[in-house]
Amino acid sequence: MQTNITPTQLKQRLDRETCQLVDVREPIEHAEMNIAAARLVPLGDLEKRATELTKDLPVIIHCRSGKRGEQAVAKLQALGFNQVQNLEGGILAWKEAGLPVVTNKSKVLPLMQQVQLTIGLGVLTGVALSQTVHPNWVFLSAFFGAGLVFAGSTGWCGLAILLSKMPWNRVEGQACCTPKNCAVS
């Protein structure tokens, strides 16, 4: 079985109900925009929640653009799932293909925009402090730059994960975000 599936192929499979669609993004990302048939199982929870999926039906994974989906496919294959595919280009490709998405018009900025603002402010702050306080503050800008390089090359963004856990990004009704189901500090 090939490891990728196109948005059109996925739509046909969903219409025939011949697969399970799993969204491996964070709850806030899923709340912003999702494919109606998708079950949310964040990548970090995939191994411990894999029992929620049946091995009898193919599993199609999707994320934002495909990177986390590739990681999820590898994790599920290691757990003995033989029929696993990744949606090429993630939900962005699905939307670009003109296929339906469910969107939330909440007042919270989208997670990626929060990440961009945080990194931009970090870089500007590092530059300003290095020019006015001490030259070593330039390392703050270097830290954010290195984080961008790492996120771009691996598809894993620690800042996005951190921001997704902030109180303003909590999604009502999500098991992972209710105080009785997770540790809230």
Image: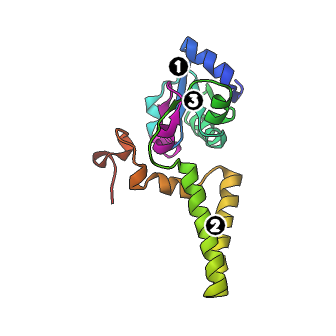
Give the residue type that dot 2 points to. Phe
Q: Nearer the viewer, mark 2 or mark 1?
A: 2
**Residue at mark 1:** 56
**C-alpha gap between disc 2 and disc 1:** 44 Å
Is residue 35 covered in magenta?
Answer: yes
**Residue at mark 3:** 81
Which residue is painted at 67% across and 84% down in the image?
131
Where is residue 147 shown, x and y percent of the image? 64, 62
- Mark 1 neighbour density, 10 Å: few (under 14) some (14–19) many (20 or more): few
Q: Circle 3 — which element? A: loop
**C-alpha gap between disc 2 and disc 3:** 37 Å
Where is residue 64 shown, x and y percent of the image? 61, 40
Give the residue type that dot 1 points to. Asp
Which residue is painted at 59% across and 34% down in the image?
62
Magenta range is 27-48
Where is residue 10 shown, x and y percent of the image? 63, 22
Looking at marks 2 and 1 on the same chain, the residue that comes earlier in the sequence is marked by 1
Image check: 39 left or right of 73?
Answer: left
Q: On the image, which quarter does residue 145 sit in?
A: bottom right
Where is residue 36 shown, x and y percent of the image? 50, 26
**Residue at mark 2:** 144
**Whether residue 131 is situated above or below residue 119 in the rendered picture:** below
Looking at marks 3 and 1 on the same chain, the residue that comes earlier in the sequence is marked by 1
Is residue 2 covered in magenta?
Answer: no
Give the residue type that dot 3 points to. Phe
